[in-house]
Amino acid sequence: MAHTAGDALTAVLDDDVERLLRAEPTVRRDAPDSVHAMRVSTRRLRSVLRSYRRLLESGHVREIRDELRWFAGVLGVARDAEVRGERFAALLEDYRDAPDTGNPDDPAAVVRRTVAELVDNERTAYAAAHAVVLTELDGDRYVNLRRSLENLRSAPPLVAQRADSEADRAFGKVLRADFNELRVMVDQETLMHADPAISEDERIEHLHEIRKSAKRLRYCAEAAADVLGGPAAELALRAKKLQSVLGDHRDAVEAMAAIRTAAEHSGTPDTSPFDRLYESEANAARKALEQYSAAADFVRQRDR
């Protein structure tokens, strides 16, 4: 186990950069889940650089974080289409179980066709977005980012005085800061939920911000697990659960938006097939949100 914060962070950065670069060949081959894996690696590294930023020289690291944000955005277009395609494909399987009456105007048949079109649309969108990813991987901007990441792992720009501090104290301080940030956001959501002046859309966006904060805490805690042991690992698991619950909610909300857009561009006055699909995703969003309070209970504890 590393005794100084600098040694501990150097090991974390080495692992995270390796994970990100190792994902690149699989993305080029368009292997299953490869875009997701590279996007997660990109976000994880950016999050670690943010959480542990006081241990690093700010200027160069800020540039790397900005470039990681850009690249995560490129991957995100493809990943979001992939997620929606997978959701609609699963929905299509559910409707395929319905009896086939042979009548093309049967409501179930109409919904099946509608879902199939949504699947095709998202797969087409994914293919186009993946082509953009490949173009960027061969572009100068990514090549420069890759070079910066390789330099980061070999010689991270540590702030000497802080890097020489004890690893457990430094990592514990960072973890408490990220935990407190999430706690404030959860407390704010409680107030928003009780305020009739707050719109549903505003609450949904705040839940999305909580999800991102939970993700940062998870990555921060995972990075600290080798230093702080079991408590950090347990905190990472709890943050991951909260992130997952709100991720399921967000996926359903974005699927609802995609269905609504498809209905608007369908050119048909009868939007009932889209309405059925929309309600299905709305139910999924509600079920995910029902798990939120329990998943966030660990954040409300005041004794950390």
Image (cartoon, rainbow, N blue to C red):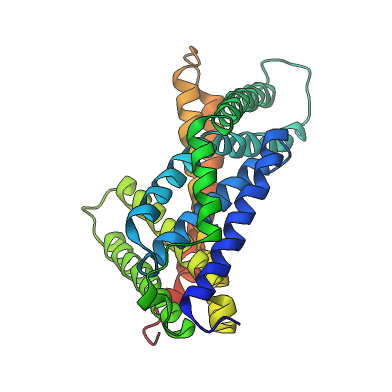
Percent of width and height locating residue 74: 50, 35
Tally the marks.
0
Percent of width and height locating residue 162: 37, 77
Quadrant containing the C terminus is bottom left
Work out whether residue 145 or residue 214 is closer to the camera in this orientation and state it. Answer: 145
Work out whether residue 251 or residue 196 is closer to the camera in this orientation and state it. Answer: 251
Residue 224 sits above or below residue 24 on the image = below
Residue 283 sits above or below residue 182 on the image = above
Which residue: 45% across, 74% down? 297
Residue 47 sits above or below residue 126 on the image = below
Q: Quadrant of residue 257?
A: top left
Which residue: 47% across, 74% down? 6
Which residue: 50% across, 18% down? 270
Q: Which residue in the rendered view is the most extreme toward the top?
A: 267
Q: Which residue in the rendered view is the most extreme toward the bottom?
A: 303
Q: Which residue in the rendered view is the most extreme toward the left?
A: 197
Using the rendered image of the protein, determine whether residue 185 is visible from the camera's viewpoint.
Answer: yes
Percent of width and height locating residue 1: 61, 82
Percent of width and height locating residue 251: 52, 45
Using the rendered image of the protein, determine whether residue 247 is visible from the camera's viewpoint.
Answer: no
